[in-house]
Image (tube, rainbow, N blue to C red):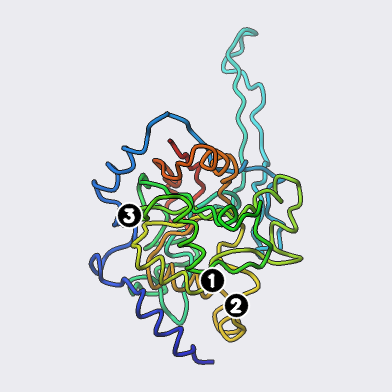
């Protein structure tokens, strides 16, 4: 089934292929220049720090079949009270080992995570990704993500604790949250989208958080244009799926499944993050009226990784 012309037109509009050269593998993260980092450093006024990560555990948010095959970390071997020497007073060591899906908790997706219509970001061939991982566009290519973060609290801007599942966030909603924050999103910024969905996970309702019953609140397709116009470096959310579910259009669902992912990752080269815990940060921003901060959120550089776990820290 051919892609609708309006989708193809939007894809052409947001496309960044070649913008940073034919060999570029980090896309919009190129927008984090020295000026963006200096702007971020100037946001540090009180020294307050907020970890935005959820705990990586065997009881995490992954349900095994949603997303398909994605599991929580699995602990399977211990080195327990292992003595270094035979002396009874020897130092003893304890270690543990986990099998880890790189996208099972708070994470960034690599640009090689998504392909569609025979396309990877910047025109790299599909065989750049194989059973050994990402030879191009892997998470290990990213290096550091340190820039100004801006919290766009969509839920509070709408006067609710959390958005209803299945709510599609529009560019107007982004504008409204930006106005509420009193901050103008600038090139090289990372935006964090708060829907309030993390509250379900905190309450132990993993099924609702995963969107099984009622869907997931998240950006709609038109937000790709907003992201591109603002030249953001990265975008993350407090949900398990980033884009809205159920999808807005059946025609794009049948063909693509993940239309916003296709536009953001493949066309734009925009790094996306999921499962960011924005509750404590959101409360603090609402209390002091300051929605900008230094964001330090570099992923673990797994060689060939198609995603990278991260403990993002917002510093105000």
Q: In terms of secondary structure, where does tag 1 sit? A: loop
Q: Are marks 1 and 2 in contact (CB under 8 Å)?
A: yes
| For residue 149, above or below residue 267 | above
The image quadrant where one finds the C terminus is top left
Q: Earlier in the sequence, mark 2 or mark 3?
A: 3
- Separation of marks 2 and 3 at Cα, in angstroms: 29 Å
Q: Earlier in the sequence, mark 1 or mark 2?
A: 1
| For residue 204, above or below residue 77 | below
Indicate the quadrant where residue 300 lies.
Answer: top left
Q: Residue shown at 64%/29% (left/top)?
A: 79
Q: Is residue 280 left or right of residue 288?
A: right
- Separation of marks 1 and 2 at Cα, in angstroms: 7 Å
| For residue 7, above or below residue 25 | below
Q: Which numbered circle lies on residue 220? A: 1
Q: Which residue, as the protein is rendered here, is positioned at the far bottom?
A: 1
Q: Is residue 245 left or right of residue 48?
A: right
Q: In terms of secondary structure, where does tag 2 sit? A: loop
- Separation of marks 3 and 1 at Cα, in angstroms: 22 Å
Between 111 and 313, the one nearer to me in the picture = 313
Q: Are marks 2 and 3 in contact (CB under 8 Å)?
A: no
Q: Are marks 3 and 1 in contact (CB under 8 Å)?
A: no
Between 3 and 164, the one nearer to me in the picture = 164
The image quadrant where one finds the N terminus is bottom right
Q: Is residue 215 left or right of residue 8?
A: right
The residue beneath circle 2 is: 248
Between 167 and 58, the one nearer to me in the picture = 167
Q: Is residue 257 left or right of residue 71?
A: left
Indicate the quadrant where residue 304 lies.
Answer: bottom left
Q: In terms of secondary structure, where does tag 3 sit? A: loop
Q: Residue shown at 47%/59% (left/top)?
A: 272
The residue beneath circle 3 is: 188
């Amino acid at each position: 089934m051919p892609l609708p012309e309006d989708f193809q037109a939007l894809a052409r509009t947001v496309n960044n292929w070649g913008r940073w050269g034919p060999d570029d593998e980090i896309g919009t993260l190129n927008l984090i220049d020295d000026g963006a980092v200096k702007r971020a450093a100037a946001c540090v006024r009180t020294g307050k720090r907020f970890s935005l990560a959820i705990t990586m555990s065997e009881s995490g948010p992954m349900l095994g079949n949603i997303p398909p095959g994605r599991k929580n970390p699995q602990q399977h071997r211990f080195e327990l009270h292992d003595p270094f020497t035979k002396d009874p007073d020897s130092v003893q060591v304890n270690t543990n080992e986990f099998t880890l899906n790189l996208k099972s908790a708070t994470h960034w997706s690599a640009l090689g995570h998504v392909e569609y219509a025979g396309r990877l970001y910047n025109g790299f061939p599909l065989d750049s990704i194989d059973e050994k991982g990402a030879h191009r566009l892997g998470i290990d290519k990213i290096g550091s993500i340190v820039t100004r973060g801006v919290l766009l609290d969509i839920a509070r801007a709408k006067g609710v604790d959390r958005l209803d599942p299945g709510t599609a966030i529009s560019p107007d909603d982004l504008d409204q949250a930006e106005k509420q924050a009193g901050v103008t999103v600038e090139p090289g910024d990372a935006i964090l989208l708060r829907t309030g969905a993390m509250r379900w996970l905190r309450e132990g309702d993993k099924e609702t958080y995963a969107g099984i019953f009622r869907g997931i609140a998240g950006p709609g397709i038109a937000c790709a244009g907003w992201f591109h116009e603002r030249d953001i470096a990265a975008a993350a959310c407090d949900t398990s799926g980033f884009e809205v579910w159920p999808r807005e259009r059946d025609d794009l669902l049948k063909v693509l499944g993940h239309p916003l992912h296709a536009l953001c990752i493949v066309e734009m080269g925009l790094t996306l993050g999921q499962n960011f815990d924005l509750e404590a940060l959101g409360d603090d921003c609402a209390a002091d009226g300051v929605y900008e901060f230094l964001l330090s959120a570099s992923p673990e550089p797994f060689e060939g990784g198609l995603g990278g776990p991260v403990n993002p820290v917002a510093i105000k």
